[in-house]
Amino acid sequence: MSEADNPCYLIENKILFIPEKQCLVHTDSHEQIKLKPTASSCLLLLLRNHTEIVTQNELLAFAWGESHRQVSFNAFYQSILSLRKSFLQMNVEKQIITTIPRKGLLIQQEITIEKKWDHVVPEVEIELTDTPSVTPNKIENKKLPKLNLAEMLIIIFTVLIVGALLYPKISSENYFSGYVASKKYDGQCHYFVNADASNYSRHEGFIKEHPEMCSDNKFLYITAYPETKNISVILCTAGMDLSHDNSCQSVYYPRYDSK
């Protein structure tokens, strides 16, 4: 594939998205954030369709391929949330990804997007586990113990039993496990905050200043960092677990200051 088929995207003249490296790079600080593969694919499709609404089904099919029909709502929304958190961490003032209720997502026209072909791709540091070198001759000469039929059957049944015990736990994984429940506040709603924040003072200040958001037993997922002024809120009709049919909308507050 030629270089022209793999452009990078300069977002708001400060964030470089490199699809082949699946990462965001801040052009000033050179800070790098490695994206999850599905999140990177979703961002790529949205950038390719700048100013156009991309439906959830289109994003699922593009990012997850043939298995997209088995992907839960929460797995999809987790990928979009991880993108929003990445832009927040890089202190991008504008909301890059906008949710259009019951239609899909888009990157609005006011967001500047520039394709770059003459970029220098920075190296993204990926921690690898050192693998000791092995001499082929030693592998060939090493004799492995032979298992009889009874031992093989025992191993197979053990694997099946362990798999049956672990499957319910794995299949019910909470994709929003990176959020923790906030302390109780008056009102009919549930608050969750991003656990990777160094403190929750900005979350608590936001909750106290916006009691109008707490209604109808909603679930609010608030993303904020002490180091940045931006705050992102996701309002859902149910908790983010795999068993619910859920409906969510996002609200973005650039340059938000607690009073």
Image: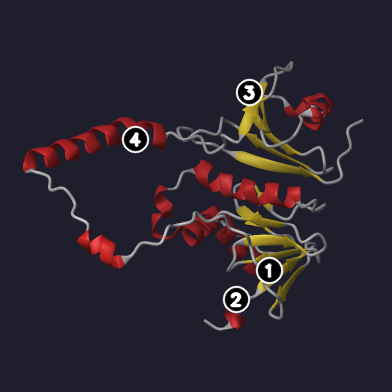
Crowd band around label 1 with a 10 angstrom C-alpha radius: few (<14), some (14–19), many (20+): few
- In the depicted view, which residue is nearer to us: 140 or 74? 140
Distance between mark 1 and mark 2 Cα atoms: 15 Å
**Residue shown at 67% from the left, 72% from the top:** 121
Between circles 1 and 4, the one closer to the viewer is: 1
The residue positioned 74% from the left and 60% from the top of the image is 108
Separation (CA) of disc 3 from disc 1:
46 Å
Three-letter code, disc 2: Asn
Disc 1 to disc 4, C-alpha distance? 40 Å
Question: Three-letter amino acid code at disc 1?
Answer: Pro
Instruction: Read off the residue under disc 3.
Output: 217
Discs 3/1, front: 1
The amino acid on which the numbered mark 3 sits, given as a three-letter code, is Asn
- Of mark 2 and mark 4, the one earlier in the sequence is 2
The percent position of residue 129, horizontal first and vertical second, equals 49, 54
Q: In which quarter of the view is residue 5 placed?
A: bottom right
- The residue that appears at 64% across and 61% down in the rendered structure is 23
Q: Are marks 3 and 4 in contact (CB under 8 Å)?
A: no
Q: CA distance from mark 3 to mark 4?
A: 31 Å
- Give the foreground label among 1 and 2: 1
What residue would you read off at disc 2?
6
Residue on which disc 1 sits: 122
**Quadrant where the image shows the C terminus:** top right
The front one of 165 and 115 is 165
Say above or below: 111 vs 230: below
| Residue highlighted by disc 4 | 167
